[in-house]
Image: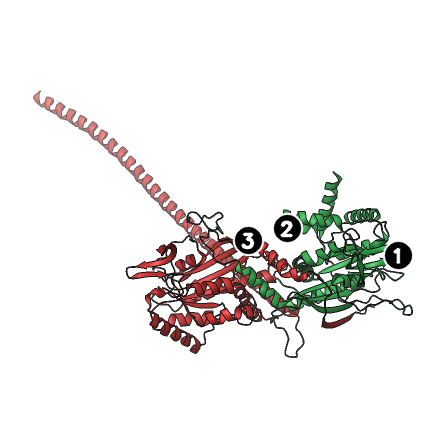
Amino acid sequence: MDPLRQSSPGSSRPSSPRTPPCEMFDYVGIEAVLDQLKIKAMKMGFEFNIMVVGQSGLGKSTMVNTLFKSKVWKSNIPNLGTPTPQTLKLHSVTHIIEEKGVKLKLTVTDTPGFGDQINNDKCWDPILGYINEQYERYLQEEILITRQRHIPDTRVHCCVYFVPPTGHCLRPLDIEFLQRLCRAVNVVPVIARADSLTIEERETFRQRIQHNLRSHCIEVYPQKSLDEDTNDRILNSKIRDRIPFAVVGADREHLVNGKCVLGRKTKWGIIEVENMAHCEFPLLRDLLIRSHLQDLKDITHNVHYENYRVCRLNESHLLPQGPGWVNLAPTPAGRPATPRSLKVCQQAQDDAKDEAY
Amino acid sequence: MVLRVENEELRNLSLSGHVGFDSLPDQLVNKSTSQGFCFNILCVGETGIGKSTLMDTLFNTKFESDPATHNEPGVRLKARSYELQESNVRLKLTIVDTVGFGDQINKDDSYKPIVEYIDAQFEAYLQEELKIKRSLFNYHDTRIHACLYFIAPTGHSLKSLDLVTMKKLDSKVNIIPIIAKADTIAKNELHKFKSKIMSELVSNGVQIYQFPTDEETVAEINATMSVHLPFAVVGSTEEVKIGNKMAKARQYPWGVVQVENENHCDFVKLREMLIRVNMEDLREQTHTRHYELYRRCKLEEMGFKDTDPDSKPFSLQETYEAKRNEFLGELQKKEEEMRQMFVMRVKEKEAELKEAEKELHEKFDLLKRTHQEEKKKVEDKKKELEEEVNNFQKKKAAAQLLQSQAQQSGAQQTKKDKDKKNASFT
C-alpha cells in the first residue's frame, strides 16, 4: 500500500500510442479491487473436480482421503465375495468442505474397474466420454439464450493417474491412456504405493517414465507449451523434474516421536506420509491444492474446454468458416471428440532434440 | 455397456487437519493481478461541465486532453486508454468522453451516438464469444462498466435532455448520476436539489446503479453512501496551501473549496464508491446483467430460441441451418437476377450497336451516291467546258482566217486602189 509519490508532478508520458502509462501523484485506491475480488470469490465459493484413475488396489481412495484429510469415500475394502465389476463404472461423490471461511465444492470421480479386465481394449472410452460429457454440458449452458449467472462447473479439472510401482517403465495400457487423455484434460501421473520401492529404484523408475512420456509426446500437467513467462517456466520446470511423484496414502494416525502423524505402520517402520524423506505426498498436495489449483481450473477452462468447443463447432459440417459462423451439430452418439493438438507433439520433439545436445 | 452412477451427496465434510485450500482466494487474486484489470468509464455531460477535470482528480494524474469546443455538429464519443499502476495492480483504464453533448440547437438525437457506442462494445464482445477459435481470456474488454452522468448545477431540477438520455441508457450501463461544479450551489439548495433529482428519477422510472448491500463487509458503507446520491462533486488538479499541507482545492476570493473535504463536496464519497469499494461489482454487473440482456436481445433478434412452443429444446443448429439456407437462397436469387440483368444489358447494347452500324452503312451509301452524282455533274461540266473551248478555238481559227483573208483582200484592194490611182495619173 505504498502511495506512488513523484518528486515532480510531471505530465503523463505516452510510451505506446494506444495505452500510455500515467504517473499518479498520490494514492488512488485501485488496489482495493483485489480485496473486492477476494470477498466476491469467497462469497461465491469455489469448485474443484478431480478424477482418480488406476487399477484397483493402487490406493486411489486412500489417496483422496489423505489429500483432503477427510473421509471422502467411506472405506471400501472390497469384500472377497463380490466379483470384480465387469464394466467400468464411474462413481462421483460431491462434498462441500470449508477451511478458514473458504468454501470448496469438491467432486471426486473414481473409476473402479479400470484396467481390471482381461481385455482392456478401449477401457479409456468411458472415461473420455465422461470428460467430454461434462464439457458438453457446460457448452450447452453457455450457448443458451437466457443463461444462468454462474454456470455450474462439472468439468474435470485434474485427472490423477496412478502408475503401478513395477519399477520398470510405463506399460502399453498406461501409454495408450495417457496419450489420449492428455489432450483432453490435465493429467498428473503419480507412482502409487511407492513404499514398495527404494529411493534409488524410485529415481530410475521416474527417469524411465519421463523418458517414456517424452518419446510418446505425452504432455502431462504442468504443460510445457502453456508456460506463460520465464517465472512460470522456472517454477514449472522444477515440478516437471519430479513428475511423476512417488506417493503413499494413509488415513490412520500413529505416534512418532511424540507427534501424531499420518502414516502406514509396518513391521520395519512407520512410513510417514507427510515426510519428504519418505515419500513425495507433500509435493502432490501442494501442487494440487495449495499452489496450482486455480491454474488447473484456468487451463481446463481456457485450453481444454476451448479445444473441445472448437472441435465440436467444426465437426461433421464442411461449412466455410468465417468469423461468427456458429455451427452446432448434435454429438454423434458415443464418439468422444478427440482434439488434435499437434503443437504439443512438436514441442515435445523439439525438447527431445534440445536435451540430446 | 457403461453404467455411470453419480452420487450427489452434498454433505459438509469435516476436515481433520489443514488441507491448504484456504490459499485459493490468493491464487485467484494472483492470477488476476498478472493479467491486469480493465475498467472503462463513460462520462456524459455538457461541454465545459468538468468531465476531464474530474477524471484527472479521481485518478490523481493528468490525462492529456485539450478542452473541446462548442461548435461540434453532433455528439461524438472520444475514447482514450491509459495504463495505471499502483503497487502491483495494473489497471487499463479507458475514459470515454461525449464531445459536443448538449451543444446543438436540436438535441433530439443526442443520445443516439452514446447508445450506439455502448452497443458496439457489447457487439464486439459477443462476436468474440461466438467465434469458433476465440481467446476470451486475452480479450481487451471495452464494455463500459460505469457511466458518470454529469448534471448541471442549476439548482432546480433535471433537464429534459438528461431525463431522456438517462432513460435510454439505464438498461445498458450502470449509471451513477453526479452533480458537477457543486461549488456553485449553496448547502441548503443542494439538499433540495438532490431530493428533487432523485424523485424525478424515480417517477420517470430511471434505474440508476444500486450499490450492493448483500454482503456484510460492504453493505453498511454502501447503504450510508447511497443516501447522498447524486454525489455533488468538485474537481480540481491545482493545489492550494491549507494549514501546512498542500491539498487539491479551488481558490476563490471568498474562500477555498477543498476537494477532499467531506463538508465541502462529495468527491471522497464518489471515489470510495467508484473505485475503492465497488469497482469489481460494477464490472460484474456489466457482464452478468447488461451484457446478458444485450446478448439475449441480439440472439433473439437473429431468430434463435431456447425452446419452441412444444417445449422441445431447439437446437441452434436447426435454426442456423434454416437461416443459412435462406441466406444462400437469397444469394442465389440475387446472382440470378444479376446474371439476367447482365444478359439483358448485353442484348440491348448489341441491338444499339447494330442500329448504329446500319445507320452508318446507310450514310455511307448515301454519301457514295451523292459523290457519284457530283462526279457526274462535274464531268458534264467539264465536257461542256471542253466543247466551249473547242468552239472558241474554232471560232478563233475562223476569225483569224477571215482576218488574214481580209488583210489579203485589203492589201489587194489597196494595191488596186493604188494602181487605180496611179493609173489615173497616167
Q: Residue furthest front?
A: A258
Q: Which chain does the numbered disc 3 sit on? A: B
The amino acid sitting under disc 1 is Lys
Q: Quadrant of residue B136?
A: bottom right
Residue that badge 3 annotates: B88
Residue that badge 1 annotates: A267
Q: Residue furthest top?
A: B426
Residue that badge 2 annotates: A228
| A222 left or right of B73 in image | right
Q: Are marks 2 and 3 in contact (CB under 8 Å)?
A: no
Colour of chain B, in one word, is red
The amino acid sitting under disc 2 is Glu
- Answer whether residue B288 is visible to the viewer in this image: yes
Measure the alpha-carbon separation of dots 1 and 2: 48 Å
Q: Position of residue B28 (x, y in %)?
A: 62, 59
User: Which chain is green in the rendering?
Assistant: A
The amino acid sitting under disc 3 is Asn
Which residue is nearer to you in this view: B423 or B162?
A: B162
Q: Position of residue A49 (x, y in %)?
A: 71, 64
Q: Residue furthest bottom?
A: B310
Q: Position of residue A265 (x, y in %)?
A: 85, 59
Q: Secondary structure at mark 2?
A: loop
Q: Which chain does the numbered disc 1 sit on? A: A
| B241 left or right of A136 in image | left
Q: Which chain does the numbered disc 2 sit on? A: A
Which residue is nearer to you in this view: B51 or B318?
A: B51
Q: Are marks 3 and 1 in contact (CB under 8 Å)?
A: no
Q: Residue furthest right?
A: A81
